[in-house]
Image (cartoon, rainbow, N blue to C red):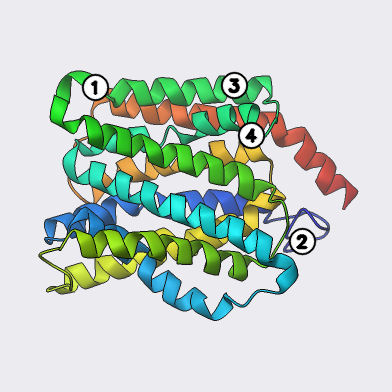
Amino acid sequence: MSTTLMIKSGKKPIINGQHFVLMAAFFYGLNPFFAQILFKEGFSAEMVSLYRFVLPALFFTFFLRTPQANWSEAFRTLLLGLASGVSVFGYFHALDTLPAATAILIYYTYPVFSVLIGWAVFKRTPTQNAWVAAALIAIAASLTVRPETLSADLLLSVVGCFSAPLMVATQVQYLSNPRRPIPTMNRMAWITSGHIIVLLPIAIWSEPVQVLPVSLTAALSILGIALLAAAIPQILFMLGAPRSSVDKNALMGSLELVVALLTGAVLSGENIDRLEMTAMLLIVLALFIKQVENKPAAQAIATNT
C-alpha cells in the first residue's frame, strides 16, 4: 500500500504517515529545552543554531550524491534548507532575547500560516475544519503573546521569530507534496547542507566567545539538539508527510507547542500560568477536530486493505 506504512496485525494498519508526523512533532518540541540549556552554558544563538544542524549535516553528507534527473529537486530542497537556516537562527535569537513563552508561541503559529500559504500560494482549498482548527491555534497563541511586555528594541527579535513559522509552514506545504519525489536521505542531505551554508558564515561573523562545550551538560545538550530535536524528527517528518494530508501535517505539528511548554515547566522549572494552560488545551482541541474529520477516511483505508 503506497500511502500507509504498516505493521500488520491481521489487516489493520498500525503505523501510518500521521503517526510519523506526530512523533516528529514530539521530538521537535524539545528544541527550546535544549536551546535554553545551551544559552545558560554560555553559547550564543548563532552557535546553538549551527550546532543543531552540524552533526546531522556531517552524517547526511554521505547521501549527497544525486542522479542528474533529480538535480532540479535537489536544488529546490537546498533552497528550502537555506531559508530554513535563517529562520531557525531568528527563532533561537528570539528565545535568547524574548520571554521564552512569547518566542515559543510565535513559532507555533505555523499551522495558521500553513493553512494560509496552502490556500494562497499552493492553491489548496482548506476544509472548514482546517479553518476552525487554525483559528483555535491563533487564539491559543494570542493568549500568551503579550505585546505590553516587549520593549521597542525587541521588535527585530519579534520579526525574526515570525520568519520561523512562515518558513516551517512553507516546508510543510511543499514537503507534503513535493514536485518530484527523491529518497528521504538524499533530501535530508541537501536540506541540511543548506542549513550549514547559511549558518556557518553567520556563526563566524558573530565572533562567538564560546565555541566548544566546557561541561558534560553542554556536550549532552549539543547531542540532544542535534539528534533528538533535529535529525530524528526531520527523518520522521519526511517519511510521514507524503503519507498524510497537508492540513493534518500542519495541525499535528502543533503538538510541539505542548511539548515545548511542558518540558520547560517540568525539566527547567518554568511556571505555566493559566493562559498558557488554556492555550495548550485549545491546541489539543484543534488536533481533535482534525482527528474527527479524518476518521472515516482512515476507516475506509483499513477496510480496503
Residue drawn at (54%, 66%) of the image: 190
Residue 218, placed above or below residue 90: below
Q: Mark 4 and mark 3: span between their CA atoms?
A: 14 Å
Q: N-terminal of the two: label 2 or label 1? A: 2
- Whether label 3 touches label 2, CB < 8 Å: no
Residue 168 as seen in the image, left or right of residue 129: left
Q: N-terminal of the two: label 1 or label 4? A: 1
Whole-percent x, y for residue 250 in the image: 56, 39
Residue drawn at (27%, 33%) of the image: 158
* Residue nearest the viewer, comparing 263 with 153: 153
- Whether label 4 touches label 2, CB < 8 Å: no
Callout 1 amino acid: Arg
Q: Residues within 10 Å of mark 1 (few under 14, many from 20)?
A: few
Q: N-terminal of the two: label 3 or label 1? A: 3
Residue 168, placed above or below residue 82: above
Q: Mark 3 and mark 2: span between their CA atoms?
A: 35 Å
Q: Tag on residue 9? A: 2
Label 4 SS: helix
Q: Nearer the viewer, mark 3 or mark 2?
A: 3
- Whether label 2 touches label 1, CB < 8 Å: no
